[in-house]
Image (spheres, rainbow, N blue to C red):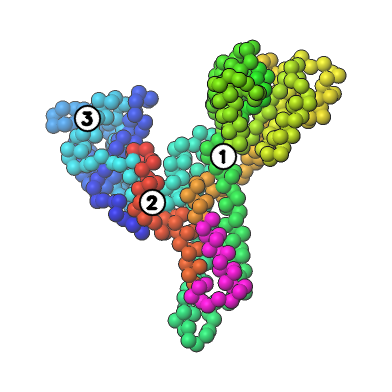
Amino acid sequence: MSTGLISSDTIVALATSPGQLGAIAVIRLSGADAIHITNTVFRGKNLQEQPSHTIHFGTIRDGDTIIDEVLVSLFIGPNSYTKEHVVEISTHNSNYIIEQVIQLLMRHGARAAKPGEFTLRAFINGGLDLSQAEAVADLIASNSAASHQVAMQQMRGGFSNQLKKLREDLVHFASLIELELDFGEEDVEFANRDQLKSLITQIYAVIRKLIASFEQGNVLKNGVPVVIAGKPNVGKSTLLNALLNEERAIVSEIAGTTRDTIEDEINIRGIAFRFIDTAGIRETLDVIEAKGVERTKEKMKQARLIIYLFDPTQDNLEEVQSQISELKEQQIPFVTIINKSDLIADAQRAELDSLQPLYISAKQQIGIEELKDELLEQVNLANISGDDVLVTNIRHVEALRKTQEALERVLYGIENPVTSDFLAMDIRQSLHHLGEITGVVTTDDLLENIFSKFCIGK
C-alpha cells in the first residue's frame, strides 16, 4: 500500500460548513500531537489526562485573551475515525472565532489539512478500505433516501465484504497455481481444473451482476434524468412547475418561449429525479430556437426516461403517432402524457386511449401524483432492498470490467489447456483489478485524484 501522501503532521480544519448556517462550528485535529496542541491553548481540565470519548468544557485562550468558550471532544487513537488522536473543538459559529482558533492551533504546531486528508488517514491507517472511503464522499453528497441508503451500505462495507470474499477464493487457487510453477518440470497439478473452472464461473456471474447494477446505482447516486419533450406550447413548462410546485419555468401562450433547457431536481418517494424542460420540437427558421431544438434532441438521447407530452386540442394525432414511433425506434424509454385532459371530450378520449397514455392537466394539477407513481414504476428503483449491493462509482465498474476480461482469459485457458504460468498471470490480473477497488492495490496518483475531490475537514 502506498503511503507517500501521508505525513506524521498534526492537521487541523473546519469540519462543519463555513458561513452562518448554524450556531456551532466544529474544528477538527488529527495526529500524534492533536491532544497536546489543543491542551496548550485550552483552559479547563488537563486534556492529556482524560479518557477517550469524553467531552470537556473550557475556554480557548491566546495568552490571557479568551477567544471563545468551547466544548472539546477527545478520541484517543486507535479508537477514532483516522485511527490517530483526534480532537474536535465545538466553538460558536463566528468566522472571526473560527479563524482565530485555527490560526492559534497552527502557531502551536498543527498545519492546515488538505481536502479529504482526514479520510485519507483513515484509509492509510486501516480504518476504511478505499471503496468505503469513497462512500464517505457519496454519503455527504447524498440528497435522497435512496442515495443515502446506497452510500451508507457501501460505507459500512457491504460492497467491500463481497469483493473480499471473491478475492479470498481466487487467492487460494492462485497459490496452488503458483505452486505448480515450482514443480514445472514434474508436470503436476495442485489446482483441480474442474474446481477452478466452477469457481471462476461463479465469480464471473457475481462480477457480471455487479457491473449490471451500475445502471441503477448510478441513477440512485446522481438522480434520474428525465426529459420533458413535445411540440411547442403543449404545457411542458407548466408541467415542470407543477412537478416542482413552484414557478421555475416561464409559462407563455406564445409558442417557442423555451429556447434552452431548464433543469431542476425533486425527490419522489426517496428517489431523486432531475427534470429537464426543453425547447419544443418543431421545424423553425429562428436560429436561436433551432439551436434549442437541437439541444432538446441531445438531451433526449442522454435521458434515462422521457415524458412525451402532447396537447390533443392542438396536436395532430397522426403526427403524435409518428413521433412516438420514432422514440420506439430509437429505443428511448418514454411515458406518453396527454395534457389538458379537462378539455377533452369523451369521444376524443376513446380515440386517444389507443396510445395508452396517462391523462393529466398540468395547469389544474390533475394527475400529477399518478404521473409520479408512473415515473417510479418506469425506472424500477422503488423496491431496491437495503441489502442489495449496487455499484455507483465509475472507477469501480471499470475495474470490474477489467476483472471480467481477465476471468474470461482464465476460463479460456482452462477449456483450451494452457500452461500454469499463463493461468497464473491471468488470475494475478483478476486479483490486481479487484484489489484496485478496495485499495489493496493503489498508487499515489490514484489516491490524490480520489481524495482531492473531498471537502476540506473530511
Crowding near pointer 3: few (<14 within 10 Å), some, many (20+)? some
Give how far apart the Cα atoms at labels 3 and 2 are: 35 Å
Magenta segment: does it hold 416? yes
Please tell me whether the stretch drawn in magenta is mainly helix, strand or loop: helix
- Give the quadrant of residue 291: top right
* SS for dot 1: helix
Give the residue type at disc 1. Val
Q: Which residue does the image show at 34% across and 38% down from the upper left?
A: 456
Q: Where is mark 1, residue-wise?
A: 219
**Is residue 435 at least partly visible in the picture?**
yes
The residue range painted magenta reads: 401-423
Q: Which residue is denoted by mark 3 in the rendering?
A: 100
Q: Residue at x 47, y 84 (%)?
A: 183
Does residue 243 belong to the magenta stretch? no
Q: CA distance from mark 3 to mark 1?
A: 42 Å
Q: Residue at x 54, y 81 (%)?
A: 189
